[in-house]
Amino acid sequence: MDSAQLKEVYKIGIAAALALVSLCLVLLPSIMGIIQKPYTHTAALWIFFLSLPVAILLLIYAYYFAAFTQARVPIASTGVGNIAAFIAIVSLGVFLFGNILSDRTSPPRITSLSASSYTPCPGSTISLTAEAQDDDGDDLRWRWEVQPDERLRRRGARGAELTSTLRSAQWHVPNEAAAGRYTVVVTASDPHRSSSAQSIELDLAAARPDAAEDSSTAPCED
C-alpha cells in the first residue's frame, strides 16, 4: 500500500471516528431526556465531557491534514484522538445503560414508618405514615397490611389488607377486634422492584364492656 492509499485509509478512519463522537454529542440531549433524575453513574458522564472535546479537536486536526493537504497525517494526533473518541463513546454508553438498568436493579428503600397511636382501642382509627427513597425517582405504590400475632391467629383473629396505595393509610380497628399484639407491614414498589418490608407493632387494648360500639375513642382497660 503506497502513501496515498494509506492516507486515504487514515482519512476514512478519522472521518468515521469523528462522525461517531459528533453523533454522541447530537444525541446527548435526547439521552438526558430518556433518563430520570436523580442520575447514577455520573462519573461516566464526567469522563464523557472531558474526553469528547479532546477527541473532536484532535480528529478535526488530523482530518484536515488527511483530506486537505499533501502533508503526512499526524499519527500521534490520530491515535490519541481515536482513543479519546473510544473513551467518550464507552463512557456515554455506561452512563446511559447504567441509568436504564438502575430502574430495574435499585429497589425503593423505606426510611420511616410511624402510627398516630401505638396502643389503639377497638373502634378507633389509626393513621399510618411512611417515607421512602427511590434512587430513580419513580412513582411508588404502597401495600399496607395489619397482621395479628401467632397467639391471636390461633384464637381466630384475622389480618387486614388496607386499601391505600399511597404513603399513608388508615386502619379502622374493628369493634370486635381481640386485644393483643398486631404488626403493621408496609412495602413500596416502583414499576420494576419492591422494597424490603418494614413493620411496626401495635398493642391493641381491650375495650371496656360498657363502651359504645360505634365510638371512635372507646375507652380501654388500663
Image: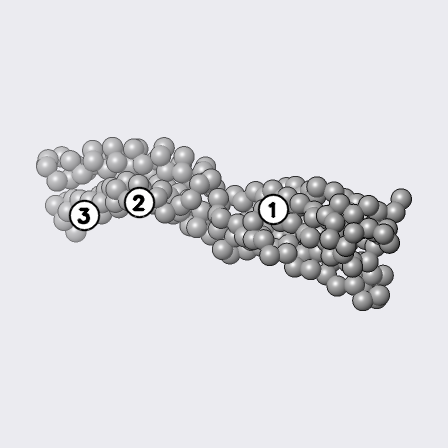
Which of the two labelled residues, at mark 3 and mark 1, occupies the earlier sequence position? 3
Rendered residue at 78%/47% (across/down): 218
Judged by depth in the image, the label closer to the viewer, 3 or 1, is 1
Residue identified by numbered label 3: 12
Residue 125 on image: x %, y %: 70, 48
Left or right of 132: which side holds 3?
Answer: left
User: Where 193 sits versus 35, above or below?
Assistant: below
Residue identified by numbered label 2: 30
Residue 35 on image: x %, y %: 40, 45
Instruction: Describe the element under mark 2 as helix, strand or loop.
Output: helix
| Type of amino acid at the residue the image marks with label 2 | Ser
Distance of mark 3 from mark 1, alpha carbons?
62 Å
| Front one among 212 and 185 | 212
Instruction: Describe the element under mark 1 as helix, strand or loop.
Output: strand
Left or right of 4: which side holds 24?
Answer: right
Residue identified by numbered label 1: 168
| Type of amino acid at the residue the image marks with label 1 | Ser
Rendered residue at 84%/47% (across/down): 220
| Type of amino acid at the residue the image marks with label 3 | Ile
User: Where 103 sits versus 32, above or below?
Assistant: below
Residue 155 on image: x %, y %: 84, 65
Could you tell me which quadrant the C terminus lies in?
A: top right
Residue 181 on image: x %, y %: 81, 53
Q: Is residue 23 visible?
A: yes
Which of the two labelled residues, at mark 2 and mark 1, occupies the earlier sequence position? 2
Left or right of 73: which side holds 205?
Answer: right
| Front one among 164 and 198 | 164
